[in-house]
Image (spheres, helix red, strand yellow):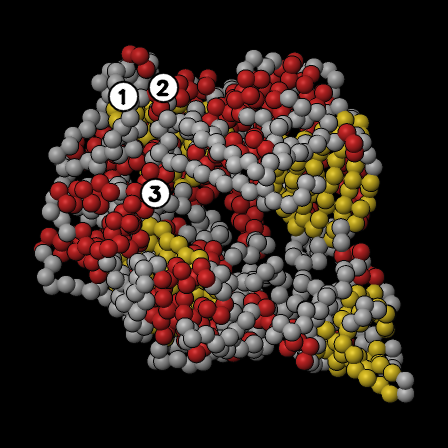
Amino acid sequence: MPPRFEGNAGCQQNDDVILGPDLNASRTPLDKKLYRQIILKKNGLRVILISDTVAMNHQDNYEYCSDSDDDDDDVAMMENSNENDEMGGDEDHSDDGSEDDSFEDDGLRKAAAAVVVGAGSFHDPSCAQGMAHFLEHMLFMGTSKYPGENEYSLFLSKNSGCDNAYTELEYTLYHMEVCQEKFSKALDMLSQFFVSPLMLQDAVDRELNAIESEFMLSKNSDECRWQQLLCHDCIVQSQAEKKNEKHPFSSFTWGNIESLKSIPEKNGVNMMKELQKFYNRHYYAQNMSVVVIGAYTLDKLEKHVVESFSDVPALPRIDLSECEAIDQFYDARAIKRVNTGTWDMIARTPIQDFGMPFQAETLGRITRIVPVKDRHSLSITWQISPQWKNWKSKPCDYIAHLLGHEAQGSLLSALKKRSWVNSCSAGVGTGGYESASSHALFCMQLTLSTEGVSYWAEIVKHVYIYIGMLRYYCKSKDGLPSWIFEELQAIQKLSHQFEDETTSVDLVEYIAESLTPYNCLPPERLLDGVPLLFEDDPNVVEDLLDNYFTPANARVDLMSSTFGRSGDFDDHVTHIPSSGDHYAINSSKGDAITFHVDTSGEPLIEPIFGSRYWSHIIPEEIIKDWNKTMQPQMPPTETEISLPPMNPFIPEKFDLKELPHDDGTHPLLFCSLKVCVPVGKKKAWFPCTANKFDGIKNRMLLGMEDGEENWHSLDLSVDEFKNVQNLKDFEGTFDEKKIKYKVIAVAKEGEGATMKYGDESDWHVEDGLHFPHIPPPLPESRLPCLLVNTQILKLWFLQDRKFKRPIGELRIKIACANANKTPLHKACAELMALLLHDASTELCYLASVCELHNEIQTTDVGFALRIHGFDDKIPALAKAMLSMLFSFCSDIPELPESINEHRFEACLEILRRRYRNSGMNAGSLCSNIRLRCLRSNLWSSTEKLNSVETLTMKEFMVTMAHVMTKVSTECLHHGNFDKSDAKTAEDIILEGLSVTKGMQKKQHPKQEVVVLPQSARNKIVVPTIDPKEPNTAVEVYFQCGKDS
């Protein structure tokens, strides 16, 4: 018998499973869920069980009833146990061993499940590209046990649930959520996907059309087109090398009707037979993992999983009639495992043997791409070794932190000063193309100005100058400063410790993604292995910079509308490349440096998405120059490049602010009680609710059923109450033992009064005979308090009592009398928001790294500013942002000191480009037209673009002075704050407002909607802006209610 891992000793012994390492020790302090991981002995399936104790405590919200369609366990699917050992939990996780929660939900929490299969698009046979995606669709079309087409999806939708799936390159993930009482049946229906799916011929055409639709939705995405171009280059180099077996990176992973129907039919391939072969070879228990969460004990969850998934075969379903060629292909892609059915299992996928996707033929060249939208971007992509094994040190995250930094001394800061670049990002993406078992792609993407397009080579040179600086520090005596890693480690630890609780379905999906066969996370690090940094490994960082981040190992892609736009060219018919096709790797004319569209000949065409592009080898002298600049050396002074500064926004205080003593917390607060009070000469028991606690006088405000409220002194102190192990059914006294009370129902923290009294009134409510009890109104201290109420400032304050974390937010709504007066006023307001964001980048980036975020955006009446995150540094960031915002109130027609003059033109270019790209998507265009028909002062992007085509800096400042002449602000200060913090916020806001004047309420901009005639039936039909947009959108608008 395998050993029982520590942390699971309290669970029931079960010969059906092998217990894994305890996960509960790696939970965050705020995570009250309980975890268990098991392997089913019968088939080797790995399962993660999650008991949602918050939902269990809220079980009164759920209706657990017998249903003719459900199993017997739906009648009483949960046992509300207060014993941690029954649920396999860690008794020392909370201070008192109870299940008290810091997280509460705002509604009913659903059960969820996810199943990940270790096969994806990289496993597609060449005769049917998109096979994995097609199979994902077909599994929803009925099973032997539940044969109705879409029966599973319909069952979920009728029971407050939903389902979805997606196909990645090396795995496919299925997930669903459903109301708690229907979880058992929903889980069984999902399990049948992997036992006996029907995959009927009748459903093929419908699902092929669905896949074709998904492909068409992606066809005009510049990001998807660029991704497919990378795949196409992988095909081209295979032709040049005359390789028989192509790298799986070169495959067409979306799939469409041509790849899944037309081509197979042409080649005599029986698609249904191929589909069954793919399923038989990849869909088996040891190639799968399951994650479930529900309001059940861990033992109950285990029982459900064992019952539902034990029939999934342990190994591939081998069909001896398969031909030898098919056997060879599937054997070549099959995952090899040792120590199967144990926690020492090691998986190895043959995909990793393919190595890097790009060879010398497609590296060291510049590819110029024609986009769909008006845009300019530069991508530098280095292919590096797969990074799964580096989960402890995460060196790519470290390098990405430095290359993608945006503070003073960063690459972005230096390139913005030259007006070449507007934004940047760096790192290895989470998708299968970027992070695979065979390779990883580290990409640096820069959004360029129009001027920057011509300086692409200089921009790349600056990147290598920065890499040279990093190599210099790596090879120095002291190495890269240790504080950089320590800052990153501390910030990631804080983010993980205080992260928001995710939804059930997102949680199971996230964990399932970490269970893919090529993932190297040890079982005990499943919860924190991805978000945390465990060790500093400068040797790996140095190796990556020396051997992979080189010009010879990079591809450079320049996408710009200066080369034209997709709509300028003839329509392209999608064609899936075959073995007989030949594609050029070099453009016939032009060169990398002196490129011009008119003299560079016809562009090359990527055959599937139809992207036009030119590809040229980068001259040797430029490659040599880049190699020289990346040598270990400090950057030239004129580049203004340096390591990032130490971050001043790292939070230092995490204590929770004390609540007011006269309205504090108490274990009895909001509990339902029964009190024994005199009635004449007798005593009788009456229901009541504990509504408010006065800690100064140690008294409780009790609310009776008739609405009467009275204070009663408590005979036990708060400290004495802490020793009460089980509050339910606890008996005590008020007013020096004059009044007895008994706790009938314990409050669900954060949800107010329970209103359960343990008598027939509860049953009458549940049976629908009586209306539910009306909860008492919240005390004024529990509602937002209006601290300031003037023409210029209205400040609301509310101290957090629910989330109990050191976080907060400051929301500021700024109403301006003339913000939306004309298209020019609105466009200038949007330009100001862009300038403010641009000018604050260096400061706000440092804050965002520390989970302190801010957003500034325009509204129909002015602006909205939100600052949120760790409360410790919110005042400092708010002061800086408000100072910059209100600096635009000046009557002097010059830009504020905080705005660099050369950035005005850059931001104006961004704004114009945004207006030109507006409405390219059919859905957004449809919504915009409807709103403009209903709102007379909602200006179109065309109107706003025309108003700023010739905008000067002086005209902009004059317009902004008119916009900001009179303002009125309304603010909400909410979170881990007390009234002294609110006073600080008031002072900061008033300091910013000191340069402007207040506005009376009658001067506020009106927001009106056109009243449609009741008899009118208006129909508006418009063509899409993009002539090649393949999608159509329809909106139906109903106007209801009385005119206010």
Left or right, residue 35 beside residue 236: right
Left or right, residue 741 beside residue 559: right
**Most foreground residue, 267 or 714:** 267
Q: Residue at x 71, y 48 (%)?
A: 974
Left or right, residue 20 beside residue 489: left
Q: How many C-alpha atoms fall within 10 Å of the one at disc 1: few (<14), some, or many (≥20)?
A: some
Tell me the distance, in whole angstroms, between the alpha carbons under discs 2 and 1: 10 Å
- Looking at the picture, which amino acid does disc 2 mark? Phe
**Residue 372's x, y, as percent?**
38, 27
Q: Residue at x 33, y 58 (%)?
A: 140
Q: Earlier in the sequence, mark 3 or mark 2?
A: 3
Quarter of the image that includes the C terminus: top right
Task: Check disc 2 and report the residue beneath it.
Answer: 563
Q: Residue at x 29, y 50 (%)?
A: 207
Q: Is residue 201 above or below residue 587?
A: below
- Tag 2 near tag 1, CB within 8 Å: yes
Task: Check disc 3 and report the residue beneath it.
Answer: 214
Q: Earlier in the sequence, mark 2 or mark 1?
A: 2
**Most foreground residue, 154 or 6:** 154
Task: Check disc 1 and report the residue beneath it.
Answer: 603
- Looking at the picture, which amino acid does disc 3 mark? Glu
Determine whether the residue tagged by mark 3 lies in a helix, strand or loop.
helix
Tell me the distance, in whole angstroms, between the alpha carbons under discs 3 and 1: 27 Å
Quarter of the image where one finds residue 970: top right
**Most foreground residue, 450 or 482:** 450
